[in-house]
Image (cartoon, rainbow, N blue to C red):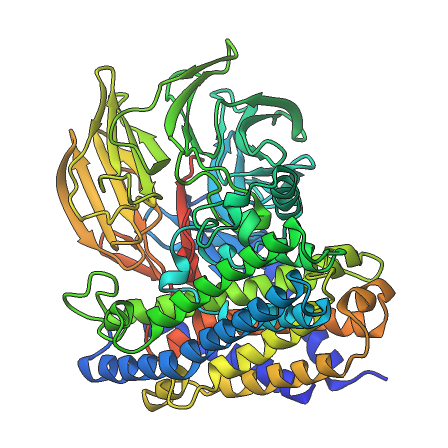
Amino acid sequence: MRAAKTLCLSLCLSFATSSANGFTVLGEEEAALLQTALTTSADAFVLPAYEAQQAAAADLNASLGAYCVGEGAIEPAQEAFVDLFVAWQRASIVGLGPIMDEEGPLRVQLWPDSKGHSQRATRTAIRAGDPALLEPGALVGRSIALTNLTALEGLLFRDLAAQSYACDLARAIAAFQADLATDLVAAWSPGSGYRAVFDSAGDGNETYPTVDALVREFLAGSIVYTDRLRKFKLARGLGDAPGDARPERTEAVRSGAGLASLEESFRTLAAFYDTPGGLFDAATAMGGTKNYSALADVATSVADSLAALDRSLEEVVAADGDAAADLRRYVQLVTFHEAYLKVGFLNSIGLSAGFTSADGD
Amino acid sequence: METRRDVLRGLAVGLGVLACGRALGQPADEAAYVGIETSARTGHSEASFFSASGARTASVPLDFRAHGMAQGGRTLIVFPRRPGTMFAAVDLGTLEIRATVHAPEGRHFYGHGAVSSDGKTLLAPENDLESLQGHLALYDMSASPRRLGSVPLPGAGPHEIIREAQRDVFYVALGGLETHPDYGRLALNRDSFRSRILAYDLGRDRLSDMGSWAGTEGISLRHMAQDADGVIYVGGQVVDARRASGDVLWRLTGGGAEMLQTGRLLSGYVSSVATRGREALVTSKTSGRCVVLRDGKILEARALEGASAVASVAGKAIWSGFTSLSLGTRTELAKPGHEFDNHGFSVRL
């Protein structure tokens, strides 16, 4: 944890010197540099993340399709679900563009779902048994409670019988998710309408009138991501202190993918920072801090530690022992990522942060 | 064995306690304005006190992210940002936190509140997490804060509440949006919500629905203030752009609601509303504009990055954006690693 200590001190120093930055506006040259870097981040980070999601969704459709018609086992479908679930944990750091349309990222994963909306929605649909709901495209516009991965997990990991309405509903949900991922890939592919907007921030661009605005939008998703990682994926099940743990409140209990989700979240943070030629790399050319490099190292180290655990997240939290204590320490660690993404990075390139307006009120 | 890390941690805690004690020891006698400054690292806020000339006088650290404020006698009440579940009552004489009050299980506050003219009753909008409908919580503030109960509201998402200057009639901006903390800030009824203003007569315990008016479709009404003539200015935020016209500021008089044509000045988002005499002071952090209006007409609009908090102090307007607070020609920067948050408050001592 030496890296974490160094990180803490360097972040404290950077905040102490960053407040006088005031309202510096990016110059033309800096704006052009950052725009190029953002385009690189889109090509080298965002698009591959969505492509992985798309590929995993396709695999799930194939394996689930085979199972539902009685030509395959359930296990490949369950494994494919976990792959899709984990792929989404990476892609979900993207908080701008088409994923924010309609009900936003909850279209893919509605969690926490403490009121059990997803389970209720699938039960209701199965009880009604409406064949029209299974037609291609029929889930478009339906409640996200019915069409998201939490609903699909509930079906796939609870005695799903082949050649049943429930199985066909699971296929329909998987198909909905595959279509969604395909749309996201299309939207972020070079030459698409959205990419034209993303790649050309500045005067005349109604969505991103300045490169500053685009940088903030790009970071906004990562800020929400770290917030969710801390509050929901870690703290929600662990509680504040030993004895407060509630394993049933951890993520993906049914599929057992909670730990993989956590691991991928930390790997995602590392990859987000370390995209070669991406936003963070470019910032160093403008005098920006290299704190992101230390943050990436620590995130990778945490991910490696999580990968070495030989129990499920639910079991780790239930035991509430040393491994759970480590997870509680990671909660604190994530706050450094949040602070850097909210303020430290922006200040280091001469922009005020505006983190208090991240989601309005 | 004590490690270097333990020593550093202990030192940090010690410094924090010392700093806190010094801040608490400063009286707020010269304070005229309270702003909220929020730390990026902790997500917690401080209530920062400023004199009428814009100089810092003291601060009170809080262990939550704060939003709006209200005053009852010598007590400043600082509310948490939605979906916070506790508010702090700060003694304006000593700047000590006299009490922290938690919402009942299954409720959260919406960041605002108002106090009756005698300073004894606090009204604070709440969300009932079971029904997702709004309530108005009532607290007796005459001694230690004591919950009296709550008044159910005819809809979801109540936000700012204000009181008429001369009587205990309160107005509540009912934003209309059903939200639950588990789903972040997602509006669960975005496609169908309507927003409106309610009036609540505390003495008669009578709630009146002032109705929805045309032009507010797709807009959540959030913030408001009443001017010296009793005119209420109401600011909203575009939530469903497919239904919203884009204008987000209204003027309510006895004759009804008038939508004010502000063009792109507010970018579909009003952060705060205050009044100064017969003028309305309006901010938009989205457009970065501070706007002054009189009789519904724009007198002045100037740029301030992240324009959010605004209040009238001794006849002067105090505005703050993300990183600076301005009063006349004086500018005060936010503390390192902090930003000024949505609201400010003109405190009366």
Q: Residue at point 33% right, 91% down?
A: A285
Q: Residue furthest top?
A: B204
**Residue A231 placement, left or right of B339:** right
Residue A7 lies, in percent from the top left, at 58, 83
Quadrant in the rendering for residue A148: bottom right
- Which one is in front, B257 or A356? B257
Q: Is residue A277 above or below residue A215?
A: below
Work out which quarter of the rendered image holds the C terminus of chain B and state it: top left
Residue A215 lies, in percent from the top left, at 34, 72
Residue A111 can be seen, yes or no:
no
Q: Is residue A225 above or below residue A129?
A: below
Residue A131 lies, in percent from the top left, at 54, 44
Q: Residue at point 38% right, 85% down?
A: A278
- Which one is in front, A262 or B6? A262
**Residue B68 placement, left or right of A321:** left
Q: Residue at point 40% right, 51% down?
A: A102
Work out which quarter of the rendered image holds the N terminus of chain B and state it: bottom right
**Residue A147 placement, left or right of B319:** right
Q: Is residue A94 above or below residue B67?
A: below
Quadrant in the rendering for residue B42: bottom right
- Which one is in front, A100 or A323? A100
Residue A65 lies, in percent from the top left, at 60, 65
Residue A189 can be seen, yes or no:
yes
